[in-house]
Amino acid sequence: MLGQIRLLYEATGRDQPLRALTVSWLPVHYETYRSAYAGLVAKCLIEDHNQRFTITDSGLRAIGAAPVAAPAKPVPDPAPRAVRQPPQAAPKAPASMMSRLFGGVLGRRD
């Protein structure tokens, strides 16, 4: 019966007239099919609406079809974070006149 329901779902969607399903039932096996239909309703795989039935999300999973999910709400972008810069060395003060003089006469020392 799940195979029959899957074919109906693929053709026209979740909401089906009950007649579309029962037309394929052989009269000899009608009571057996009716019991199976009642079992699917009891297991909440389909919902019975008198002359119509609807395939539930559980029913779609049972027949191997993925239920159509509601569109996801867009996730807002997180607040921008400040990029941390690595610390930079403080610039050296220019050398005084005396240190430049002695550095040139005695040789440079670091």
Image (spheres, grey):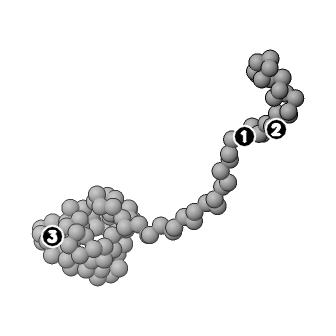
Kindly identify the amino acid type of the residue bearing the numbered disc 3. Trp
Figure quadrant of residue 28:
bottom left
- Which mark, residue 80? none
Q: Nearer the viewer, residue 51 or 14?
A: 14
Q: Position of residue 23 (x, y in %)?
A: 15, 75
Choose the circle earlier in sequence order: 1 or 3.
3
Residue 33 lies, with reference to residue 52, above or below; the image says above
* Label 3 packing within 10 angstroms: few (<14), some (14-19), many (20+): some
Give how far apart the Cα atoms at labels 1 and 3 are: 83 Å
Q: Is 90 left, or right, of 20 in this rendering?
A: right
Residue of label 2: 93
Residue of label 3: 25
Residue at image location 83% in from the left, 26% down from the top: 101
Q: Nearer the viewer, residue 44 or 87?
A: 87
**Quarter of the image containing the C terminus?**
top right
Regarding residue 42, the answer to whether it shows in the image is no
Give how far apart the Cα atoms at labels 3 and 2 are: 97 Å
